[in-house]
Amino acid sequence: MRLFKKEHDTVQVLCFPEETVEKGDYLVVEDLKAKRSLLVQVVDIQFANLPGMMEDLVREDVGDAYLFGEDYDPLQLNSQITLLRDIRILLGKIRCSIQGGSIDMNVSWLPSRVHSQIYRLKPHQLFELLKLGFRRPIKIGDDGDGFELRIDADALDGKLSIITGRKGSGKSHLSKLLVLGLVDHGAPVLVFDVNGEYVNLGVNPNGEKNRYHDRIMVLNPAKNFKVTLSYMGLATASSLLAHVLSLPETSLREFSRIWKNLERSDSLSLKSLKNTLRCCDLNEHVREALLSRVYTLERSGFVVEEGEETVRLEDFFAKTSGTGGAAVINLSRSFPLERKLVVEFTLSKLVELLRVRRVKACFLFAEEAHLYLRETYWEDAVTRMRHLGLFTTFITNRPDSIGEDIYRQADSIFLFNFKNEHDLNAISKAARIDGETMKAIAQSLKPHHCMTIGQVTGEIPFVIRVKPLDVKTMGETRTFFS
Amino acid sequence: MLLENTAEATVPTRWAEVSLRSLKDMEENSGESLELTVADTGEEESSLLKNWTTSFHLHSPWNDFQSRIVKLHPRPPRVKVAAVDCSSRKIGRTKKGLVCAFRGTVVWRDDFAYRYLRYGPFLFHITERFPETFRDFAFSSTVSASAFSFLNPSGWLSRIRYLLEIELQRMVCESSRDSIILWDGVMPAAGLDLDPVSPYLSHILRLARSGNNKVMALAKETRLFSENGGPLPEATELPSPCLVDVDKCVGEVSPSSQRLGYTFIAKFAPDSPGFRLDVDRCLPKGEMVEAVERLLASDLTFQGYPETLRAAHILSALTPVDVLGLQRSLAGRYGFKIVRSPPVRRMLFGPYGGWDDS
């Protein structure tokens, strides 16, 4: 490979056919005289536009159509000429410098064309250089040559992450790897599972229990995940009524008054709440509004009377303290309204627990959050909740469902394949990488390959082949033919 | 196969041997720099022998000119058409001389398709010792000694290409039967200093006639001038297809008795500019016209140019990509460092330094 051109942060490298380079690969442009190197990521591969190439190809095509013959090439020179047709130009983005074996972000120098040698740096070598995956490693994939690539769990701690890619590209797979990786390091993880894909994390592909089995708690709303009004508390209940069931403010005020009266008399229950609403002195419209919402809560099966088997989130955190564990809230069989109720309750309760420091911190994995997360929660998740100790990872196949502000604040993005430019534009506006790189690489990513952007890989974008999981990963999609 | 009765492999083998022998100098001097200029990889070297008689003056008035027009009618049955062309390029300069590449192609059309045999590329290192190397080979027995009298390496370039071309012409003329054989360029006059190989060409034409072949040469660039030096009526005004007998006009340049070809202007298509066509002079004039009519029935034409000859030209051309590949091959094989020579003319004269960078 030879250094050909440099314009702004883009380098062009002449690459001969025998040298194998793919989009996303890293090249080291080592200036032997200056004793430092530029680290360049290949973002596009083009054919070199050699003079006369067009005439050559047209000539060949003319020949193919109606000319048949043989070449007598006793000196065997034609092979060298044919070789030239496949000379490529690698377009690379300069990422950083390497000097004395350390990364240096100063890229304001130009390597020599004469004294530079260019070679491909394998991802695992770069991981070592960046000292990634040494503290609390999470194995997320390999570099295609069998070398494991690890990131640090610390890179997700206190951070906002986004996993995005089109359907079937492997984003849920990576998300599960991260969940289990965090569990391995003793972290509590909460998963909003809209497709029932995470419910088998505690089971091997052959159906046997795996080492995570006792640390994975699957919570099915209205089945093994029910709550009482007293556990819910007034704040959370008000939040549910206001944000999910759209209760007007005047009615909410009456609701608070009644709730407090019932609490004072130590008789807070669904039954007593309904009776009170029926009998007390209330405007008929308010009564109707409140009763209809309480019935909705009751009918959801998620809010139950005292005495039934219920779940307390703090119990989950107590149980997983030290060992780590994941609570998978299976929303796949819930109706949209119930789904929103469960999510609103969980987040509201979680924030309450974090605020009073009953829970130290928690990682939240939210699949297709646009289906159940209300608008204001997005900003809340990346600002207030993060400060309280809730570290969210959004997983979506609709990048435009996540606001530009969220992308701007994302510390790491795991980007899987997208063909649609509109999708990529949504991310590239605010991601921590130039749009050119993102579009060039993301469109050619193979299934189960992702590009990491941001802190998780030391601000150096990587293409990683996500490793297979040794757990039952299939969701519960029902099919007709199998 | 067109060349079934001849040992067609002898041509490439012989040329490969000369090539390797000439390149031996490089092995002995590997490590020296191979300097290249843009001009070296630019325009193909033109051959004196191909161009020197493509401009000629008509001394006759226009009325007389019209009487020289022979209208043509494609005349079946179809016969085999074969064509030969060669090309050459400078690849670079060494301290001792010049490295050049040559490629030749024979194309023929049979009942089913166009077929070709392409020879080369052959690389030659032309140094002061090259004439000895070249003379030692079999060419010396057939070609006049004066063919090797050029010592200027650039002169050798067109000389070698011409020799490769006539080698291929001989091969085709010897092996073909009842065919039309097309050469590129013109048929020179025998005995001229500029064409020391013409006796050998006479021999080749005899070989062709012995196989009942009709040989004709077609020059791509042809310019006609009237007596007072002004341009003649546009070639597009001529009917097509037709021939214009201009043999006497060429006679002013060289005596017709010495010329190997009988010269016409050939216009095979309405959009054709008209080309100089030399037909084997030893054929009766009627047979010449008949041969051209057979050509029209047997071959396609593209803008009035026979497709067989066009394909031969296209296939033998050495493109800039070819040149680059050959330079890389030399660098790899002999360890040359390729150095680009500074564009002296451009540096001295700026935009007035000519179109080439040299």
Image (cartoon, rainbow, N blue to C red):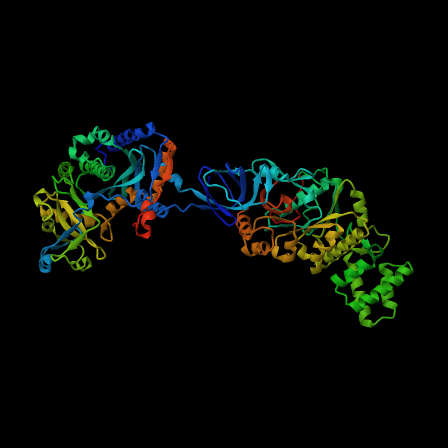
Q: Does B211 appear above or below A429?
A: above
Q: Is residue B112 visible?
A: no
- How many tags in the picture? 0
Q: Does A221 appear above or below A135?
A: below
Q: Residue shown at 13%/37% (left/top)?
A: B199
Q: Nearer the viewer, residue A399 or B255?
A: B255
Q: Does A31 appear above or below B71?
A: above
Quadrant of the snapshot with the C terminus of chain B: top left
Q: Nearer the viewer, residue A457 or A308?
A: A457
Rendering quarter of residue A74: top left
Measured as percent of width and height from the top left, residue B181 is found at 19, 42
Q: Is residue B280 visible?
A: yes
Q: Does B318 appear above or below B227?
A: above
Q: Nearer the viewer, residue B65 or B161?
A: B161
Measured as percent of width and height from the top left, residue B5 is found at 21, 33
Measured as percent of width and height from the top left, residue B104 is found at 26, 39
Rendering quarter of residue B168: top left
Left or right of A450 on screen, residue A137: right
Q: Residue shown at 87%/70% (left/top)?
A: A281
Left or right of A192 on screen, residue A97: left
Residue found at the very far right of the displayed protein: A265
Measured as percent of width and height from the top left, residue A418 is found at 56, 51
Quadrant of the snapshot with the N terminus of chain B: top left
